[in-house]
Image (tube, rainbow, N blue to C red):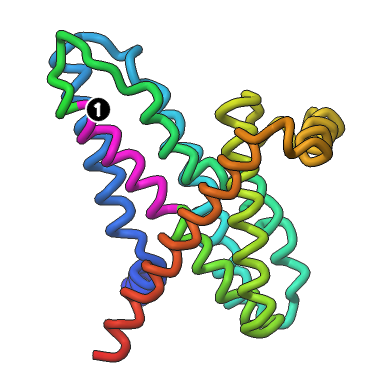
Amino acid sequence: MINDLRTLHRFLTGQLFYPILLSTALALSIYAFRVYLTHNNIVYVNLVWNIGLAWIPYLCSLAAVAIARSYPRQWWLLILPGILWLIFFPNAPYILTDFLHLDERASVPLWYDILMLVSFAWTGLFLAITSLRVMQLLVKTYLGWGLSWVFVAVALGLSGLGIYLGRFERWNSWDLFFHPKTIVKDVAVLLANPLDNLRFVGFTILFTAFLLVCYLTFISVRRMDEIS
């Protein structure tokens, strides 16, 4: 039993579970204190929902790693968690767009709401970057380093697209299960007329670039520890 717990602890430590859990707890605590101060649990409740969705791709990445370690030669077992990860991955960085809801309210200082939004946005970004790194390393194991970076570029590009569809077209990840044809049609229309949809093009490119820079910064910081 103790050995099993130690093994689990080492596994979770390697996947940055504890700092992510701490970051999530901080964000939820700030929100909970806001509810206590205002006696209003409606304002910004979407943050709680979104942080829950942001955990899904991270948990999918943990499942993928666990499967790969238990059955290293049965790569096809990674297809299901991989697809689920890709579908829900945009939910993690999506929280960055919740700053659109920021507004000065008499009941709470503006700086408090800014700090709350930052804590949720950072946690979502942390979840996104960590799960992407986990999945990239899995792709590297089976397909090589070059294709793993192709995977990163495609995942981030689709994430930028997914965030746009969520924020402006009001689609959700699970809609891919129920309305796949409609979503594909909407995306096709946007891609077919890029000059008529400059907001779509600009948003997707900028968000993809931003996430890529964040990802490169993250892995560079981790490499500093390896070098030192």
The residue that disc 1 covers is 31
Q: Is residue 95 magenta?
A: no
Q: Quadrant of residue 161?
A: top right
Query: Is the C terminus in the top left, top right, bottom left or bottom right quadrant?
Result: bottom left
Which residue is painted at 64% across and 33% down in the image?
Answer: 165
Which residue is painted at 24% across and 27% down in the image?
Answer: 31
Dominant secondary structure of the magenta stretch? helix
- Can you give x and y, in whole percent of width and height, for residue 209 in the image? 51, 56
Identity, as a three-letter code, of the amino acid under mark 1: Tyr
Which residue is painted at 67% across and 84% down in the image?
Answer: 144
- Can you give x and y, in whole percent of width and height, for residue 120 in the image? 33, 39
Q: Would residue 7 be visible to someone looking at this image?
A: no
Q: Would residue 214 be visible to someone looking at this image?
A: yes
- Can you give x and y, in whole percent of width and height, for residue 29 in the image? 21, 34
What kind of element bears circle 1?
Answer: helix
For residue 39, side relative to residue 157 (left or right): left
Looking at this view, is 55 or 216 the one in front?
216
For residue 92, side relative to residue 115 (left or right): right
Query: Is the N terminus in the top left, top right, bottom left or bottom right quadrant?
Result: bottom left
- Can you give x and y, in whole percent of width and height, for residue 218 in the image? 37, 67
For residue 106, side relative to residue 44 (left or right): left
| Region in magenta | 113-127
Which residue is painted at 21% across and 12% down in the image?
Answer: 105
Q: Is residue 124 magenta?
A: yes
Query: Number of callouts in the render?
Result: 1
> From what the image shows, is residue 203 above or below residue 18?
above
Residue that lies at the very extreme toward the bottom in this rendered image: 227
